[in-house]
Image: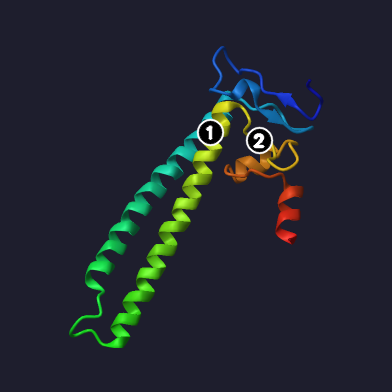
Amino acid sequence: MKTSENKTAAPASGKAAKGADILTVGAGDAPWTAAEIAEIRGELESDAEHLREEMNTAEQEIAGLFRDGGDGAGNDPADVGSNTLERDNEMYLANNARNMLEQIEHALSKLNDGTYGVCESCSKPIGKGRLQAFPRATLCVSCKEREERR
């Protein structure tokens, strides 16, 4: 059942990007074109590759800090504390990159199954502009605002 709030994108040419022919858009939003979907997919895939590289670098840094950061002879407490702080920072960066990568992979999965652009809280369209600005979005603006107020 389609309403004015649940329009689907029509293929721009004979071939739409995978899932583009069934993506939901909000009232007042133009249907997704294959080029727009390809752009979003490309951005997400590029970001995912960058994050994988970032995680790999951070994990190598962490391994080096664990290897070199022992509190053995010659390390005064300040050095040990500095190494611990640096290691914790690298672990934070790696975890943040891992979380963002999971969000990107989730968005790509939604693109593939045709549910991209549907709010995971209220099932209404997220809005094309929001998704173009923040492709990993899983909540509409109203639900995101409500979540942040909690």
Where in the figure is residue 51, as x and y percent of width and height?
41, 49
Q: Secondary structure at mark 1?
A: helix
Where in the figure is residue 119, as x and y percent of width and height?
70, 40
Residue assigned mark 1: 109
Q: Amino acid at mark 1?
A: Ser
Q: Is residue 122 left or right of residue 50?
A: right
Q: Secondary structure at mark 2?
A: loop
Q: Is residue 86 above or below residue 137?
A: below
Q: Quadrant of residue 9?
A: top right
Where in the figure is residue 79, as x and y percent of width and height?
29, 83
Q: Residues within 10 Å of mark 1 (few under 14, many from 20)?
A: few
Q: Quadrant of residue 1?
A: top right
* Marks 1 and 2 in Cβ contact (< 8 Å): no
Whole-angstrom CA distance, mark 1 to mark 2, is 12 Å
Point out the tag, 1 or 2, that comes first from the N-terminus.
1
Which residue ends up furthest to the top in the rendered image? 14
Q: Is residue 75 above or below residue 46?
A: below
Residue assigned mark 2: 117
- Residue at 73% x, 36% y is 123
- Residue at 61% x, 27% y is 114
